[in-house]
Every structure is written in structure tokens, then in C-alpha cells.
Amino acid sequence: MTTRVAVIGATGKMGRLVADLVEQSDDFELVARLSSASELSDMLPAEIAVDVTRPGVSQDVVEYAVDHGLRVLVGTSGWSEERIAALSRRVEGHDDTGVVIIPNFSLGSVLATFFATLAAPFFDSIEIIEAHHAGKVDSPSGTAVRTAELVSAARAAQGPVSAPHTDQRARGQEVGGIPVHSLRLAGVQARQDVIFGGGGETLTIRHDTTSPSSYERGILLALAATRDAVGVTVGLDKLIPLTPAAAGQTP
Ligand SMILES: NC(=O)c1ccc[n+]([C@@H]2O[C@H](COP(=O)([O-])OP(=O)(O)OC[C@H]3O[C@@H](n4cnc5c(N)ncnc54)[C@H](OP(=O)(O)O)[C@@H]3O)[C@@H](O)[C@H]2O)c1
């Protein structure tokens, strides 16, 4: 049996990608495409609402869907911890609805961040350089911020990283004590390097996005997880077995 899906933001870049994947899938059926010209009630024939709109719009879309008993997959940026906490309270106690929020659908990016957390306790010197296309207005990227937070947490027992001279602007913005440097360049889509410095060696964990098709596998994984979601789940890393012991179990 197929699961009925509505895509909100279906005229946008991410929305078109999600709609195409749903249409190609044997497990899902696309029943509504919403844009800024639609009524939110247009999503109601669906069981899952996929929100890929804009940060200022997403909260209303998600709350409407949850209040009408749909499960929701959110790809839109800008879901702060406070917003997520408020949404969790709204969803609490409802076993028939749930929300999956995926700030980054790229499996490679999620793996790179995971690998960085494994390396974190072994190096005292850690910096992040992220590069994106010139059209990206925010910096550092949400992924760089999340990576820095997780790397910092992963080495909590070792204490703060050694980051000298961070009072100088060119040393980047500190997140969790880790200097993050943002490049906005023509010719680049998205790249992130996490660089670890140790005695006589450096280790670089790099992720490169070369095409939006990098999101496809993560979108399908997240759609499958949303079908039975209860409560609020945040991050693709929660949907795949990311432990060294799980090596070899590919989703
Ligand atoms: N999670 C990830 O891996 C990932 C990856 C890339 C991007 N993103 C995020 O996904 C979001 C969408 O990105 P995009 O590049 O697809 O943006 P986009 O091309 O600008 O598309 C935005 C979409 O939202 C729709 N929209 C705007 N206001 C609306 C409203 N009030 N009600 C319903 N729909 C509305 C637009 O409809 P109109 O055509 O009518 O304006 C359009 O379909 C952004 O927040 C972006 O940062 C996430």
C-alpha cells in the first residue's frame, strides 16, 4: 500500500526534487503540490506533509499539518532549538503524528560529521573551513555550526581545543571553541573541511557536494522514517546506524 504525500514548496528547487522522487517511488503517492499561492488545507488528502519552504513560513506549515493529524518531514532550514522544543510539546502525547526534521539530507555530509566526532578526542587543534556558492546569505553554514558543536561535545573530557589568537577577525568565528571560516565563492556548490592538527601531522575530513542529487538517498530514508514517526526526530544521523560496531550495515 502506498503512503499519500503532499509537498509544500513544490515549485522550489528542493520541492521539485522531493516531488520527483515521490512520483518515481512505488511506496509513496504524490497527492498535492503546494506553493505560496495554495491554501494549507490543500495538503489534507495526504498522510505525510513534506515542508521545503522558507524559514519564515515553515513553522506555520508544520503546526497546521500536525494539528490536522498528518506526519511531517521538514527539510526547511532555521529550526532552532527553541522552535524544536515548542514543536515537541505540541506533538507530545499524540501517538498518531510525528515530525522528522532533517537539516541536511546529504548522507556523505552526515557521515563526515560523524567521522569528525570520532577523531575529535585525539587532536587538540581543530578548525573548520566551509565553502558555499556566492548566493548563500548566512554564514557559517548550519552544517558547520552543527559539526563544530558535535566535535566540541565529543571531546568534552579533553577540554577546549587549542585555538590561539582568536581575538583577530581573520581567525574565524568560534563555535563551541572551534574556529569556523566561511568562503562564499563562484564555482563552488558546498564543501566542508574539518582539519585536525596533531604532533607532526594533520588529518582533514572533507565533504564535497557536487549536485543536488546528493540529497536523494537521504530524502528517501527520511520519508520512510516519517511514515511511522512519533514525537520529534532531528537529523539524518538518527535514522542510520552510526556506530563503529554497525560498520557494514548500510541502509
Ligand atoms: N535539508 C536539506 O538538506 C536542504 C538542502 C537544500 C535546501 N534546504 C532548505 O530548503 C528550503 C527550500 O529551499 P529551496 O532551495 O527549494 O527554496 P526555493 O527554491 O526558494 O523554494 C521555496 C518554495 O517555498 C514556497 N513557499 C514560499 N512561501 C510559501 C508559503 N507561504 N506557503 C507555501 N509555500 C511557500 C515557494 O513557492 P512559490 O514558488 O510560490 O514562491 C517555493 O515553492 C530552504 O529553507 C533551504 O535552506 C534544505
Image: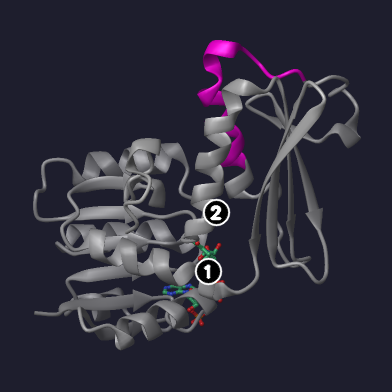
Place residue 62 in its image quadrant.
Answer: bottom left
Residue indicated by mark 2: 109
Q: Which mark is residue 214?
A: 1
The kind of secondary structure element at disc 1 is helix
The kind of secondary structure element at disc 2 is helix
Q: Main secondary structure of the magenta part?
A: helix
Image mark count: 2
Question: Would residue 53 be seen by someone viewing this image from the given angle?
Answer: no
Asked whether, in this view, residue 201 is left or right of residue 103, the answer is right
Asked whether, in this view, residue 28 is left or right of residue 104, the answer is left
Q: Amino acid at mark 2?
A: Ser
The image position of residue 2, as x and y in percent, is 14, 80
Choose between 191 and 37: the one closer to the eye.
Answer: 191
How busy is the neighbourhood of tag 1: few (under 14 within 10 Å), some, or many (20 plus)?
some
Q: Is residue 19 magenta?
A: no
Q: Are marks 1 and 2 in contact (CB under 8 Å)?
A: yes
Q: Is residue 232 above or below residue 63?
A: above
Q: For the point 69% across and 57% down, which residue is it?
A: 191
Q: Is residue 59 above or below residue 144?
A: below
Q: Is residue 149 magenta?
A: yes
Please state, as top left, top right, bottom left or bottom right, where the C terminus lies in the image.
bottom left
Residue interval drawn in magenta: 145-162
Mark 1 or mark 2: whose residue is earlier in sequence: 2
Q: For the point 88% across and 21% down, which residue is it?
A: 165
The image position of residue 16, as x and y in percent, is 46, 83
The image position of residue 158, as x and y in percent, is 59, 12
Q: How far separated are the C-alphas under marks 1 and 2?
A: 9 Å
The image position of residue 19, as x and y in percent, is 37, 82
Choose between 113 and 85: the one closer to the eye.
Answer: 113
Asked whether, in this view, residue 164 is left or right of residue 95, the answer is right
Q: Amino acid at mark 1?
A: Ser
Label 2 near ligand 1 (CB < 8 Å) = no
